[in-house]
Image (cartoon, rainbow, N blue to C red):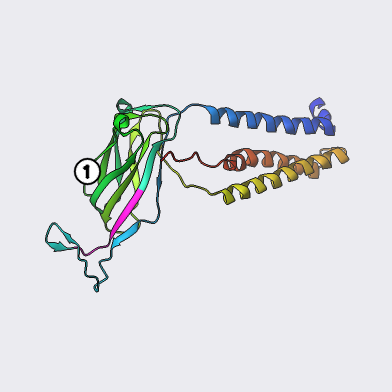
Amino acid sequence: MKIFEELKKPHNLITLALTILSISLSIYFYVNSLKVKDISYVLNNPPSIIYDSQNYSSEIKLLVNDSLLAKENVYLLTGTIWNSGELSIYANDVRKDIELNIGNENKILDYKITKTIDEEISGFNLTRVDTNSLLLGWDYFDPDFGFNFQIIYMGNEVPYFNITGKILDIKNLNQVVQRNKSSLYNNIVMALVYLVIFFSIIRLFVKKKFRFEKTDLLMVLILLILVLVFVTAILPNLYLPKNIPL
């Protein structure tokens, strides 16, 4: 068992651990650097209420269909959709219509695009499909191109907003939850704690001879788990999401 004999030497064990960490980091950064098509969106939560149907003392009354008094609350939902990838998305890349949906329980009263990057070039547009869905179209959807939108709807405060459709080389559209700097600092602290534990275990191996006892094998297992957790869970959270271009 020559390999096991070599691993008993602290120097070789440390080298192995650092090699595993280096390979894992290399794979992560390589995958992270690949150019991909990607669309992201963010909602400004919660939606703002603009008409309270239960406020009987209000002098403002909302009529729907020009004659019927609205019996449900009316809300304003705003958000942003943009190309968060590194490649352009062409209209002929769309395999299934891209639709903005607010749930069957809600009814769209009004909608519009409020701000667009390079409006004359991008040509973003929204078209009503039915009472709760809008069709999204564009001329050019280049990286960092995007638009702000607003939807006035009647129904529930939580609209169950989602975007459906199929685009070539894009599996899912990403809903972005923006993190502030304090959450980034917390993740950095967590990463440092992991690194301290990682090198503390290595230091234990340096101080004593590795004999492949149960405690030694347990520490090796913990070491490998720490590397895996650091690469898959901690490292990706050390970056703030790409800035929304609008």
* Residue displayed at 23% across by 50% down: 110
> Could you tell me residue 202's position as x and y percent?
79, 39
Q: Is residue 192 left or right of residue 200?
A: left
* Residue displayed at 75% across by 39% down: 220
> Could you tell me residue 63's position as x and y percent?
16, 61
In this picture, which residue range is highlighted in magenta?
Answer: 70-78
Would you say residue 24 is visible in this rendering? yes
Question: Quadrant where the N terminus lies?
Answer: top right
- How many tags in the picture? 1
Q: Is residue 234 above or below residue 44?
A: above
User: What residue is pinned by disc 1?
Assistant: 128
Question: For the residue carrying disc 1, how many other residues have a C-alpha within 10 Å: few (<14), some (14-19), or many (20+)?
Answer: some
**Which quadrant holds residue 65?**
bottom left
* Residue displayed at 34% across by 58% down: 48
* Direction bottom: furthest residue: 57
> Could you tell me residue 174's position as x and y percent?
43, 40
Question: Quadrant where the C terminus lies?
Answer: top left
Q: Specify the amino acid type for callout 1.
A: Arg
* Direction right: furthest residue: 208
- Which of the pair 45/122 is nearer the observer? 122
> Could you tell me residue 191's position as x and y percent?
66, 44
- Which of the pair 197/175 is nearer the observer? 175
Q: Is residue 117 above or below residue 188?
A: above
Q: Is residue 68 left or right of residue 116?
A: left
Is 63 colored magenta in this rendering? no
Would you say residue 214 is visible in this rendering? no
Disc 1 is placed on an element classified as strand
**Which quadrant holds residue 73?**
bottom left
